[in-house]
Image (cartoon, helix red, strand yellow):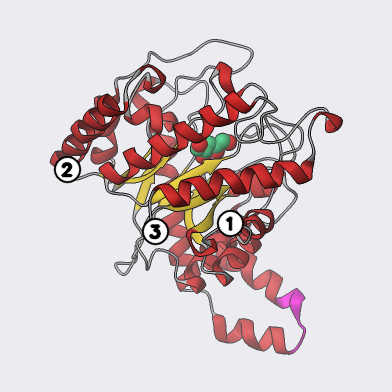
Amino acid sequence: MSKKSPYRFCFGPWNISEGADPYGPATRPAQTFNWKLAKLKEAGFDAMMFHDDDAVPDIDNKSEAQIRKEAKELKKKLDDLGIAAEMVAPRLWFSPNTIDGAYTSNNPGHRQYAIDRSLRSIDIAKILGTDILVLWLAREGTYIRESKSGRHSVELLVQAFDKMLAHDKKIRVAIEPKPNEPMDHAYIPTIGHALAVANLTRDPKRVGCLIESAHAILAGLDPADEIDFAMAFGKLWSLHLNDQNGLKYDQDRPFGNTNLRSAFDQVRALERNGYGKNGEYVCFDVHPFRTTKPERWLDHLTNSRRTFLRLLEKARTFDEATAKQFIADWNYQALDQMVLDHLMGK
Ligand code: XUL
Ligand code: MN
């Protein structure tokens, strides 16, 4: 294993999930948040991602002062354990106030709720010591095209982002695009959409993105190309590596589990662009299989990290000089086989 890895790793408490799906109940008993923190440390990860209500449970029923108090208590706990907070993300898809979307809801009171909750998330992020607010725009779209104006929705998103940027001069907003699920079509389905909307805000420099491999695949895109694209703009501030088998529901499979070559290409794209050099983390947004027993609860995370590190070794030992010759000669057949041979090993 290479010693020069600048990469640091993280996951979220929701990645130690209990196995429930829309058709059946949990298959593992719930664990406490403290247990998850201890396991993260034991497994050699460096940071944790937080939804606002992972950090401050029952956030909707708490005052601003109480939210700050609990965030400070969490910060102390993290410091004592030597765990960083990678980001905070408002969970804007659970509440009765977001059933028609959050920032783009047709109900003005609900839009205000979404903005207020985002501002509280920024307060929590600052207390936890991260300047990254992740926005997965779960319900910003519609099932009924005529019920919303796409143009007006863009304006509402920009207004909401502007309020967040004005609330704190340092916060950076990382948009996590996903083309569908729960909506059939989302308003920000790709990195291109996210970066285009960034340009309409009051401070485009502070609006970037987070790429999730599975979301890119669901959009019919190559995750490695999405990484290169975002990094050409200096806008890839976080990353959810995982895998996905085709155009189905979001599967959050272990990294490299379905398409090892694509996983290699993602690692190679991260390497060539110097991902991590500005403190960015590699996060795995993966879930255990439903059959996983509690004693193997973290294996999908440690395996994803192991696969990442092994592919990093593959990326660093790829024969770039020979690849260059094949490219110059348009001998893509030889290049193709060289990649396969390299991945399979001699
Ligand atoms: C949803 C998803 C979320 C975000 C965090 O598909 O990926 O877990 O990453 O809100
Ligand atoms: Mn994700």
Q: Is residue 330 magenta?
A: yes
Mark drawn on residue 79: 2
Q: Residue 113 versus residue 231: which sits nearer the camera? A: 113
**Image check: 21 left or right of 100?**
left
Q: Looking at numbered disc 3 in the image, what kind of residue is underneath it?
A: Glu
Residue at horizontal 65 percent and vertical 31 percent from the top: 139
Q: Is residue 121 visible?
A: yes
Q: Secondary structure at mark 2?
A: helix
Q: Judge by depth and name the residue closer to the eye, 156 or 208.
A: 156
CB under 8 Å between discs 2 and 1: no
Closer to us: mark 3 or mark 1?
A: 1
Earlier in the chain: of badge 2 and badge 1, it is 2
Which segment did they paint magenta? 329-334
Q: Secondary structure at mark 1?
A: loop
**Residue type, numbered disc 2:** Asp
First along the sequence among labels 2 and 3: 2
Where's the N terminus, which quadrant?
bottom left
Mark 2: give few (<14), some (14-19) or many (20+) Cα within 10 Å: few
Looking at the image, which residue is at 17% across and 40% down?
A: 81
Q: Compared to 190, does 62 lie above or below? A: above
| Amino acid type, residue under disc 1 in the picture | Thr
Give yes or no for contact between labels 2 and 3 (Cβ–Cβ under 8 Å).
no
Q: Position of residue 221 (x, y in %)?
A: 72, 54
Which residue: 55% across, 67% down? Answer: 231
Q: Marks 2/1: CA distance?
A: 34 Å
Residue, disc 3 = 280
In the picture of the structure, the residue carrying the numbered disc 1 is 201
Location of residue 138 in the rendering, given as x and y in whole percent from the top left corner: 61, 34
